């Protein structure tokens, strides 16, 4: 389990707005090491483009170089993610709107691909899988209260993950103690002017129970966690 690293510098947030960089960090969240060559094959991007973005993420401190491997007269560099980037409230507040929208768009693209792939493989088949959408009317105080509750939920997710990791280390991969890769997506956003019939209204259920838990976009977008090139 990689630790979270709060980002407060708007320049670093801008660096994460590129969709390819978010996808690189998402892949390195799931695997220990990868080289630009391996990443380029996984994502269908030219090696030159991939190498550039990996070098930028390394220079910005999101990746660390851990191994150099000779390959047919060249050197293949293997990187790993140093931490899960998470944008702080202060950093998000100072970020220009155009960068916020680019970063949110890139994150939603990655989330959409991830969730749809999981769904096609039965990721929501479990009885206690969750998927809901709720439209609520709040005043300013209610907005702040709900944002605070969702921040607490994110803290609970991190705590539960840490406790599960400790149990897995102690018990190994037995049947009773098997690691389950679990996706959690949370959002909270202004929906003023968005027609409710833009997607089916109300709560949507898959399986016996379903719930997509909200979280402020600035916290969710950093899941995975620069600069617009």
Image (cartoon, rainbow, N blue to C red):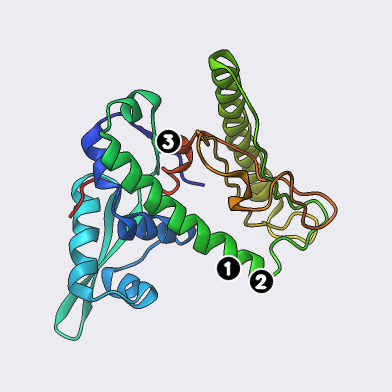
76 left or right of 166? left
Residue 130 x, y percent position in the rendering: 72, 49
Structural distance between the alpha carbons of marks 2 and 1: 6 Å
Q: Secondary structure at mark 3?
A: helix
Q: Nearer the viewer, residue 156 or 174?
A: 156
Are the residues tagged 2 and 1 within 8 Å (C-beta)? yes
Q: Residue 117 got which mark? A: 1
Residue 76 figure quarter: bottom left
216 left or right of 153? left
Structural distance between the alpha carbons of marks 1 and 3: 24 Å
The residue tagged 2 is: 121
Q: Residues within 10 Å of mark 3 (few under 14, many from 20)?
A: many
Q: Residues within 10 Å of mark 2 (few under 14, many from 20)?
A: few
What residue appears at the point 83 percent right and 56 percent down from the top-left corner? 127
Residue 201 x, y percent position in the rendering: 69, 47
What residue appears at the point 69 percent right and 63 percent down from the top-left corner? 123
What residue appears at the point 81 percent right and 57 percent down from the top-left corner? 207
Residue 69 x, y percent position in the rendering: 24, 73
Q: Residue 218 got which mark? A: 3
As drawn, which residue projects farthest toward the left? 73
Q: Nearer the viewer, residue 105 or 87?
A: 105
Structural distance between the alpha carbons of marks 3 and 2: 28 Å
Viewer can see residue 220: yes
Residue 187 x, y percent position in the rendering: 55, 39
Q: Is residue 210 above or below residue 141?
A: below
**How many dots with numbers?**
3
Mark 1 and mark 3 lie on one chain; the one further toward the N terminus is: 1
């Amino acid at each position: 389990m990689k630790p979270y690293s709060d980002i407060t510098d708007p320049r670093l947030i801008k660096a994460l707005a590129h969709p390819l960089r978010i996808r690189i960090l998402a892949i390195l969240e799931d695997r220990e090491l990868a080289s630009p060559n391996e990443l380029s094959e996984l994502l269908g991007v030219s090696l030159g483009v991939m190498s550039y973005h990996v070098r930028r993420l390394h220079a910005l401190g999101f990746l660390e170089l851990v191994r150099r491997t000779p390959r047919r007269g060249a050197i293949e560099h293997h990187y790993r993610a140093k931490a899960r980037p998470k944008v702080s409230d202060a950093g998000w507040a100072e970020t220009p709107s155009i960068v916020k929208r680019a970063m949110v768009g890139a994150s939603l693209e990655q989330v959409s691909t991830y969730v749809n792939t999981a769904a096609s493989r039965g990721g929501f088949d479990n009885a206690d899988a969750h998927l809901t959408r709720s439209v609520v009317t709040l005043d300013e105080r209610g907005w702040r209260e709900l944002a605070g509750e969702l921040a607490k939920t994110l803290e609970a997710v991190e705590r539960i993950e840490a406790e599960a990791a400790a149990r897995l280390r102690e018990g190994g991969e037995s049947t009773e103690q098997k690691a389950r890769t679990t996706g959690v997506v949370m959002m909270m956003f202004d929906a003023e002017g968005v027609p409710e019939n833009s997607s089916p209204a109300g709560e949507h259920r898959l399986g016996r129970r379903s719930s997509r838990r909200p979280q402020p976009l600035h916290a969710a977008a950093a899941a995975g966690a620069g600069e617009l090139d």
